[in-house]
Image (tube, rainbow, N blue to C red):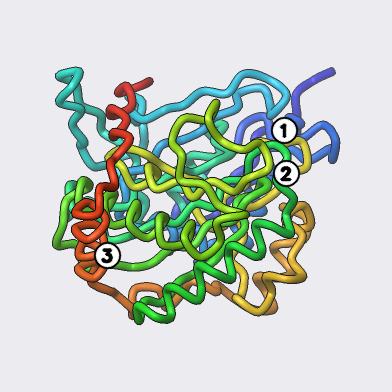
Amino acid sequence: MAKAPAVELEVGGRTVRISNPDRVYFPALGATKLDLAEYYLAVGPGIVNALRERPCMLHRFPTGVAGEKVHQKRVPAGAPPWLQTVRVHFPRYGQHADELCVTELAQVIWAVQMSTVEFHPWNSRRAHVEQPDEWRIDLDPMPDCPFDRVRRVAHVVHEVLDELGAVGWPKTTGGRGLHVYVRIHPTHGFGDVRRAALAFAREVERRAPDDVTTTWWRKDRDPAALFVDYNQNARDHTMAAAYSVRGRPGATVSTPIWWDELDDVEPGDCTIGTVPARFAEVGDLHADIDRHPWSIEPLLEWADRDERAGATDPGQPPDDDAGA
C-alpha cells in the first residue's frame, strides 16, 4: 500500500511538514501521527506553557507506541534554524547535550514529526538551568495501590500546601498516579529543592501513615502503598508535562484538573480524544502558575528539624546518562 503524502501544517506562521501522517501510533484507537499532531495543535497554549524555556527530553516512538521507545535528549543535526535549544551538562560523564527548549508551538509539532509522543521537561528553565523554579510532588502508586488511596493522599497534600501558603497545581499523570506542581523562586539548587521535597513527603507520611511511604527502595515498600517520590526533584529527573500524551495504548494525557475534581476524575478518561474538548471549554488550568511563586525556606527548616531528630536521607540517585 502506498504511503499517504506528507501533510504541511501552518503553525504560528511556520510550515511544519508531517511525513507518514497515516502511520498508526495507537493501534487500539486507530490514532495516527497526524491525529497526534492535531491533538497538540488543539492544546497548543497549554503544552507551550508547560514546556516554555525548559530543557526537554523527548520520548520518541518511531513505529508507534507498540514499538521501541527512544529517550532523546540531543536535538539532531539538520533541525530547522528556528528551533530553540539549551545546552545542559552532565559532569559525571563529561558530556553535554543541546536539548529542545520550546518557545512556540511549531517546535512542539516539529518534535511530533520526529515521532515524539511524550514531552519530559526539566523543572528549571534555560536562564537558570541549575536552579529549579518548579517543585514537583509525584504521587506514585505501588502496583496494588487503589486510585482512591491516591485521591486521599492528594487531599492531604492540598491540606499541607494550604498551611504552608503554597499554591499547588494538580494534574493526572496519564497513568495511575497524580502530580502536583508548585512554582518556586529559582534561588536554590537541585540539592536543596530535593531536600525540601523529602521533608514535605515525610510530613505527608506522618499525616497519612496507613497510605503513604517515603521508603526509597521499591523492594522495601508495601505493594499497596502510595510512594511520594521526592527524587523527581533531583537534577535531570523529568516527568511528563501537563498536556503531554503518554506512550500507552489508550493515548492517555497528563491533564491539569481542579482540586475539586479529585474525587471524580478517572485518569483513563483523559485522552487525546477527550482533552481537546475539555481544553476548549475550560482552557489551560495551569495558565496562572507563574503568578504564584513560593519560597521553599519553610521546607528547608522542616528538613533541619527532621535531621536533628535523626532522620536520614536514603541517598540521591546519580544523574541520568546523557542519553541519545
Q: Which residue occupies 53% across, 57% down?
A: 179
Q: What's under tag 1, amino acid-wise?
A: Tyr
- Measure the alpha-carbon separation of dots 1 and 2: 9 Å
Residues 217 and 27: in front is 217
* Residues at circles 1 and 2 in contact by the CB criterion of under 8 Å: yes
Q: Which residue occupies 60% across, 51% down?
A: 173
Q: Quadrant of the C terminus?
A: top left
Q: What's under tag 2, amino acid-wise?
A: Ala
Residue 62 image point, x, y percent: 60, 23
- Measure the alpha-carbon separation of dots 1 and 3: 43 Å
Q: Is residue 130 left or right of residue 125?
A: left
Residue 60 image point, x, y percent: 54, 30
Disc 1 is placed on an element classified as strand
Q: Can I make out residue 317 in this image?
A: yes
Q: Quadrant of the N terminus?
A: top right
According to the image, label 2 marks what residue?
251
Foreground label between 1 and 2 = 2
In the image, residue 161 sits, relative to residue 120, either above or below, namely below
According to the image, label 1 marks what residue?
25
Q: Which residue occupies 34% across, 51% down?
A: 198
Residues 254 and 104: in front is 254
Disc 2 is placed on an element classified as loop
